[in-house]
Image (cartoon, grey):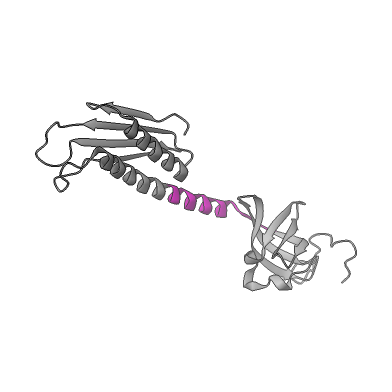
């Protein structure tokens, strides 16, 4: 967390047990999202002797980049007669957890969509191949060597690929660096698909047509 969490107690005494529970729940939030900007927690006693419901209220305010504000609150209604403070705290953190999970899921999907939009289509030549492991590398027109996996090859044609095979693919940023997706075989090694048969990349040394 960029800023240490702020925990405020109002009209009640902080105990070691309650403080430990709160910090345990904060740690679980950070496991879901490790880039929370700030977290402010207010634990208060709003009634000394309520006729029904809980005398406690817990509110959690979080900010998550780039500018999301999440608010979770628990103040059990009449159906819960005097639930203990620990239960109210857990309810509030459970609500915060649901919101945080949903936000991070949406952000991951948005990032994937952005990466796909930013991906560049290119023509490349297979330069390294590891059939048993199910992956290989292609060299693009600008000389960049890019990883690809057999699952990225269209029409389940990974077994047709050889060193020197020409392909069309999209180069995008993966978790471990640039990788090729939507890999499509275009023609025999070193030759562009089409009538012109223009060489796209110099074939590997020793390759013969």
Residue 131 rendering spot, x and y as whole percentages:
74, 67
Residue depicted at x 21% and y 36% = 56
Residue depicted at x 36% and y 49% = 98
Task: State the image quarter where residue 125 is shown.
Answer: bottom right
Q: Is residue 96 above or below residue 199?
A: above
Q: Is residue 116 above or below residue 44?
A: below
74 to the left or right of 182: left
147 to the left or right of 191: left
Q: Which residues are magenta?
A: 104-122
Task: State the image quarter where residue 68 is shown.
Answer: top left
Main secondary structure type of the part rendered in magenta: helix
In the image shown, does 59 or 206 lie closer to the viewer?
59
Task: State the image quarter where residue 166 is shown.
Answer: bottom right
Q: Where the C terminus falls, by quadrant?
A: bottom right
Q: Is residue 68 in view?
A: no
In the image shown, does 150 or 14 lie closer to the viewer?
14
Residue depicted at x 36% and y 36% = 22
Q: Is residue 55 above or below residue 147?
A: above
In the image shown, does 166 or 199 lie closer to the viewer?
166
Q: Is residue 117 rendered magenta in the image? A: yes
Q: Is residue 81 in view?
A: yes
Looking at the image, which residue sits at the far right? Answer: 206
Residue 7 rendering spot, x and y as whole percentages:
34, 29
């Amino acid at each position: 967390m960029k800023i240490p969490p702020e925990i405020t107690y109002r009209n009640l005494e902080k105990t070691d047990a309650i403080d430990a529970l709160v910090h345990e729940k904060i740690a679980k939030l950070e496991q879901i999202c490790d880039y929370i900007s700030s977290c402010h927690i207010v634990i208060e006693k709003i009634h000394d002797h309520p006729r029904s419901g809980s005398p406690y209220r817990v509110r959690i305010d979080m900010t998550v980049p780039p500018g999301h504000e999440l608010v979770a609150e628990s103040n059990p209604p009449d159906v819960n007669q005097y639930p203990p403070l620990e239960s109210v705290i857990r309810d509030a953190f459970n609500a915060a957890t649901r919101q945080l999970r949903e936000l991070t899921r949406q952000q991951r999907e948005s990032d994937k969509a952005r990466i796909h939009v930013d991906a560049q289509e290119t023509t490349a030549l297979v330069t390294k191949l590891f059939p048993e492991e199910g992956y290989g590398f292609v060299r693009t027109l600008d000389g960049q060597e890019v990883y690809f996996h057999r699952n990225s090859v269209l029409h389940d044609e990974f077994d047709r690929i050889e060193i020197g095979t020409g392909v069309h693919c999209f180069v995008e940023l993966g978790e471990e660096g640039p990788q090729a997706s939507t890999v499509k075989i275009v023609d025999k090694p070193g030759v562009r698909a089409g009538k012109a048969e223009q060489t796209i990349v110099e074939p590997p040394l020793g390759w013969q047509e």
